[in-house]
Image: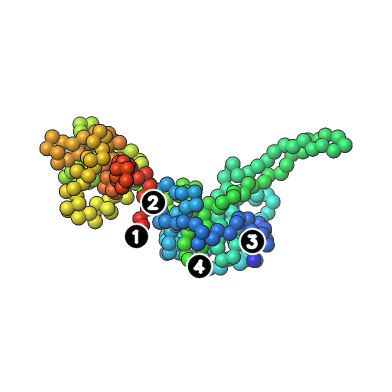
Amino acid sequence: MDHVLVKLKRLRKKPYKKLLSDTALFEVIDVNSISTLSYDVDHNLDNDGWFEIAEFSEKDYFLNILSQEIDAKDYDDLAKDKFDDISCILGLQGSDVYFQKVTPSSFIKRKLIQFGEVAKLEETSSRILIKNVPDAVYLREEDKLIFRDLATISSLFKGIDILYKEATDDEVKAFLASDFIELAEGYNHESVSKPNRKRLALVSETMAEMPDQQKSELIDYIQEYCENGITLTDDKKSFKLSTDNELKLVLYGIEERFYTTKHGQEKRLANSVQSMA
């Protein structure tokens, strides 16, 4: 049986209340008809794509309410005076839980002119706009959370923004001190932008697993595609970084985002990547 719960803000004890019974808010998402991939900060989703977090129940940001089957009878009905305190909607549909974040813009309250024997002004009560697509879905049988935008759900799952982590100052300094990098005067760890700090956090693991031979070929590979976008030192053994864009090209090169089309021999940058393995 389908039900709708809501979570109220600023309420520590019993924050979840029952809103509707025998109601399904969202169209059922068939996991076999959508494409999913593990979350990647630098990936642009296709129209039918979703990010996924496998083994979600083992994560620190897993919600306690999801730890067992949710029985709507265990929750009090939402009081009318608490309607404006709703921060999240939970659609219990089968064994899955559909989430929608509720923000001030989700509430709709309008004045209408009603025509009858005489025209009269009517002010509607507050309503919540339900999205066509939920912000996240917990697939209980697969123990998987799927979502499309991490920033949207970060307030629903406290701590999940660890997936969107930035490299620390120490990590940035260590990377910029690599043998294949030389810094131009005036460019240092404080010059590295937030987007590049996020990219740098992702490539750290790639660099740690990269064979020495591949590291030695890295300069030639990046230079081949970024001849006009990046500068080498006089001995051609290091990148001389003076701008944030140059650093971005190096980070893209480490992830092997540059490629040449097979037939047209056109050099391209893959703005998003997905492993085929």
Q: Which mark is residue 277?
A: 1
Structure colour scheme: rainbow
In front: label 1 or label 3: 1
Q: Residues within 10 Å of mark 1 (few under 14, many from 20)?
A: few
Indicate the position of residue 173 as horizontal and vertical percent values: 24, 43
Give the vertical position of 222 relative to 66 (above or below): above
Q: Say if mark 2 contacts mark 4, CB within 8 Å.
A: no
Residue holding disc 3: 3
In front: label 3 or label 2: 2
Q: Residue at x 69, y 38 (%)?
A: 110
Q: Say if mark 1 contacts mark 3, CB within 8 Å.
A: no
Residue pushed farthest left?
235
Most foreground residue, 187 or 42: 42
Measured in 3D between alpha carbons, the distance from the residue under mark 2 to the one under mark 4, in whole angstroms, is: 24 Å
Answer whether residue 110 is visible to the viewer in this image: yes
Indicate the position of residue 27 as horizontal and vertical percent values: 60, 56
Most foreground residue, 75 or 27: 27
Q: Say if mark 3 contacts mark 2, CB within 8 Å.
A: no
In front: label 1 or label 4: 1
Residue holding disc 2: 40
Which is more N-terminal, label 4 or label 3? 3
Q: Quadrant of residue 190?
A: top left
Indicate the position of residue 261 as horizontal and vertical percent values: 32, 45
Which element type, helix, strand or loop, lies under badge 2? loop
Indicate the position of residue 16 as horizontal and vertical percent values: 59, 58
